Image (tube, grey):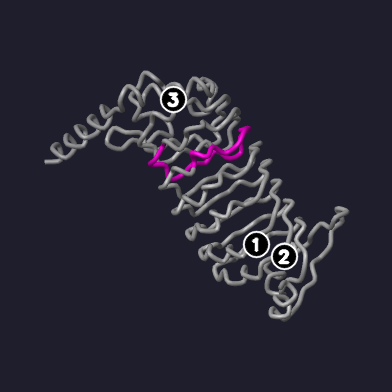
Amino acid sequence: MKIIPTLLLSILFSFSMLANVSQSEKEALVKLYEATNGKQWINKWDLSLPVSTWYGVKLQDDKVISIRLADNNLVGEIPTEILNLTGLQELDLHKNKISGMIPVFIGNLKEMKVLNLSFNNLSGSIPASVCDMANLKDLELYMNALTGELPMQIGALKQLEVLSLFNNEIVGEIPNSLYDVKTMKVLLLNSNKLVGGLSRDVENMTALENFSLFDNKMDGQVPFELENLNNLKEMNISYNRFKGLVSKNLAVLDTLNMTMLNEQGITVLLDVTTNRNSAIVSED
């Protein structure tokens, strides 16, 4: 009697091995392998075997839905052919040696939920097409050499929970649309070259738990509306050029207790008041 279940399992396994992707998707994967020096990867692909056996590749209904190749010694650039993986929901290339630019039309991957290209050598700006990824929940591009401004329509990512862009060379102001992303839990923009003020609309980000603007060039009054973020557990907005009074509650919440840089580049502590109302009067 045990022979039948064993036989069924063998048949199912055989079918799973036969499951394969379209020629277009297979070619896109092969191009990724070749463009990032696949022969030198830590975990290599045997291109003679079915795609379903390739390390880090997950299939569903004969479509590639996930590529996880973090810390795998990928060296080279992301090929544009990757846009042919129209069912892709996750692309994790964290901690490799990928250079060049993020493909301009990366936003064509409409099913994408997790895009992690952090800890590489990427340059250029964040493509505006990223804002077309309506299903995106996790965008991590930190520890690269990205420049330019944040896409103005980034607030179109209504399901975004994690935006981690620290340690780049991003300039300009925070787009007003970003404050409308009420699903955001982690917002890490530290160690860039952001300027301008922090809008009072930050209070719209009610799910925010971890917020960092550390080491930028932002200025103006620290909005007391930050106190309305009841889920906020970690915050660091120090080493900017914010001025004015801050409440004790906000100062305690900040990792470095609101240490700012003055016009001469000297570190100063913002004045702290125990009375929030008096600080608001000062702001007005």
* Secondary element at tag 1: strand
Of the 4 image quadrants, the one containing the N terminus is top left
| Residue drawn where x is 44% and y is 43% of the image | 133
Helix, strand or loop at label 3? It is: helix
Amino acid at pointer 2: Gln
**Camera-side mark, 2 or 1:** 2
Q: Position of residue 189 (x, y in %)?
A: 63, 50
Mark before the other along the chain sequence, 3 or 2: 3
- The residue furthest front is 284
Q: Who's the residue at 42% across and 42% down the image? A: 112
Q: Amino acid at mark 3?
A: Glu
Q: What residue does disc 3 label?
A: 81
Q: Position of residue 88 (x, y in %)?
A: 39, 37
Front residue of 48 and 64: 64
Numbered disc 2: secondary structure = strand
**Mark 1 belongs to which amino acid?**
Met
**Crowding at label 2, few (<14), some or many (≥20) Cα neighbours within 10 Å?**
some
Q: Quadrant of residue 261?
A: bottom right
Q: Which residues are magenta?
A: 109-130
Q: Earlier in the sequence, mark 1 or mark 3?
A: 3
Say if the magenta span includes residue 233: no
Identify which residue is drawn at 72% across, 54% down: 218
Q: Residues within 10 Å of mark 1 (few under 14, many from 20)?
A: many
Front in this rendered view, residue 49 or 138 = 138
- Which residue position is annotated with label 1? 235
Q: Is residue 92 above or below residue 259?
A: above
Spatial separation of the CA atoms under disc 3 and disc 2: 46 Å
